[in-house]
Image (cartoon, grey):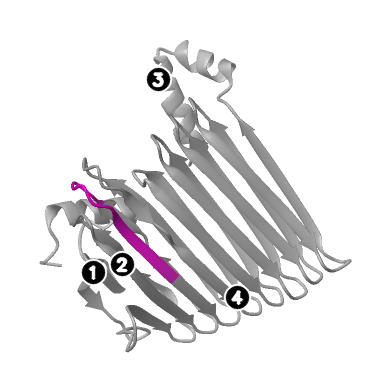
C-alpha cells in the first residue's frame, strides 16, 4: 500500500470505502500492477499463470470473511483487460468487494475491462459489491466495460450491488447468470449518467432448475445529454420464479431505452417484469421547495433518495 499515491487513495475510498489496508484477503491493483495482496487461511489469491488477472479460491465452510479486489487507474492513456475467477466452496458466507476508479487528467482515453467469473458451490451465500467511478479534468475519456458471469449451485444465494454514479464517460456492462435448483440471485443496480456519457447494461439470467429464482432491480437517472440502455432478459427453463424492474428518471435532454424481456420455456415458470421512465414529479419539487430548498437542491434530494 506504500506505493499508493493520494489520487489513488481517494479513488479507493470512492469505490471500496477503503481508508487503510482492509481486513482479510485483498488484492489491490493500481496502474496495471498489484500494489498490495494478502491471503488468509481460508481465502487464497494467486496470479494467473497465463494472461492478466487472479484466481481467488475460498474454502468450504468459510463464513464472516471478506475479499477486496479494487482497481484504480491514474495514468492517462492506460488500457487493460483483467480476468478474475472466483471459486467459492460449499456452505460459505462471504463478502466480495470489487470496482474500478479512473482519474484521467490527460488527453488520451483510459480504459479498464474487468471480466469476473464466479463459481459458487452448494448452500453458500455471497454478497458482491461492484462500484465504478471516474474523475479528473482531462479531455481523455474514462471507459469501463465490466463482464460478470455467475454460476450458482444448489441452494446458494448471490446478492449483487452494482453502482455507477459519477464520472464514467462510456460503459458497457454485461451480466450473465445461470442458476441451479433452489438457487437465488438478487441484483440491485444504481446508475447515473450526465454530460455526454453513454451507458449500456445487459443482463441475461437463466433459471435452469426447479426452485431457482431471480429478483433484478435497476434504478437510473439520465441527465444533460447522456444516453442509457437497459437490456434485461430472464429465461425460465423450469419451475422457477423471476422478477425484473427498471425504474428511471429522465432529465434535461437525456435519453433512455429500456428493453425488459421474459422468456418462459416451462409451463411452471412464473415471470414478471415492471418498467417505468418519467421525469421528477412537480409536486415533489414544490413540497421540498416549501421547506426552504432551491429547485436544484430539491432535485438533488429526490435523486439521492431514488438511487439509495
> Do residues under tags 1 and 2 come within 8 Å of each other at their CB atoms?
yes
Q: How many labels does the image show?
A: 4
Checking the image for residue 179, the label placed there is none
Mark closer to the chain start, 4 or 2: 2
CA gap between label 4 and label 1 equals 30 Å
Disc 1 secondary structure class: loop
Is residue 140 shown above or below 119?
above
Quadrant in the picture for the N terminus: bottom left
For mark 1, what is the residue?
Answer: 32
Image quarter of residue 267: bottom right
**Left or right: residue 191 compared with residue 131:** right
For mark 4, what is the residue?
Answer: 152
For mark 3, what is the residue?
Answer: 296
Q: Which marked residue is nearer to the observer: mark 1 or mark 2? A: 2
| Along the line of sight, the residue nearer the viewer: 100 or 210 | 100
Q: Identify the residue at image location x=42%, y=27%.
A: 300
Considering every residue shown, the one lying at the far bottom of the view is 49
Q: How many residues crowd mark 1 within 10 Å: few (<14), some (14–19), many (20+)?
A: some
Image quarter of residue 19: bottom left
Range shown magenta: 103-115
Q: Identify the residue at image location x=53%, y=79%.
A: 119
For mark 2, what is the residue?
Answer: 80
**Left or right: residue 66 compared with residue 277:** left
Mark closer to the chain start, 3 or 2: 2
Amino acid at each position: 500500500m506504500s506505493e499508493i499515491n493520494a489520487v489513488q487513495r481517494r479513488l479507493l475510498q470512492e469505490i471500496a470505502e477503503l481508508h487503510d489496508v482492509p481486513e482479510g484477503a485483498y488484492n489491490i491493483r493500481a496502474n496495471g500492477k498489484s500494489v498490495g495482496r494478502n491471503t488468509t487461511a481460508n481465502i487464497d489469491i494467486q496470479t494467473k499463470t497465463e494472461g492478466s488477472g487472479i484466481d481467488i479460491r475460498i474454502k468450504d465452510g468459510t463464513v464472516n470473511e471478506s475479499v477486496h479486489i479494487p482497481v484504480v487507474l491514474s495514468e492517462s492513456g492506460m488500457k487493460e483487460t483483467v480476468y478474475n475467477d472466483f471459486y467459492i466452496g460449499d456452505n460459505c458466507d462471504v463478502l466480495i468487494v470489487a470496482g474500478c476508479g479512473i482519474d484521467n487528467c490527460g488527453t488520451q482515453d483510459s480504459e479498464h475491462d474487468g471480466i469476473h467469473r464466479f463459481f459458487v458451490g452448494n448452500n453458500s451465500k455471497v454478497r458482491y459489491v461492484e462500484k465504478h467511478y471516474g474523475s479528473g479534468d482531462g479531455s481523455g475519456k474514462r471507459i469501463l466495460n465490466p463482464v460478470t458471469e455467475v454460476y450458482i449451485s444448489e441452494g446458494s444465494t448471490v446478492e449483487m450491488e452494482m453502482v455507477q454514479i459519477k464520472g464514467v464517460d462510456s460503459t458497457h456492462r454485461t451480466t450473465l447468470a445461470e442458476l441451479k435448483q433452489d438457487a437465488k440471485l438478487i441484483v440491485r443496480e444504481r446508475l447515473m449518467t450526465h454530460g455526454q456519457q453513454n451507458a449500456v447494461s445487459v443482463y441475461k439470467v437463466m433459471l435452469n432448475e426447479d426452485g431457482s429464482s431471480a429478483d433484478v432491480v435497476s434504478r437510473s437517472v439520465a441527465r444533460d445529454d447522456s444516453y442509457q440502455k437497459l437490456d434485461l432478459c430472464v429465461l425460465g427453463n423450469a419451475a422457477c420464479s423471476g422478477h425484473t424492474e427498471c425504474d428511471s428518471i429522465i432529465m434535461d435532454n437525456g435519453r433512455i431505452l429500456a428493453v425488459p424481456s421474459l422468456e418462459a420455456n416451462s409451463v411452471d415458470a412464473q415471470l414478471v417484469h415492471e418498467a417505468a421512465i418519467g421525469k421528477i414529479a412537480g409536486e415533489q419539487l414544490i413540497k421540498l421547495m416549501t421547506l426552504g430548498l432551491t429547485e436544484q437542491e430539491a432535485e438533488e434530494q429526490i435523486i439521492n433518495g431514488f438511487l439509495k
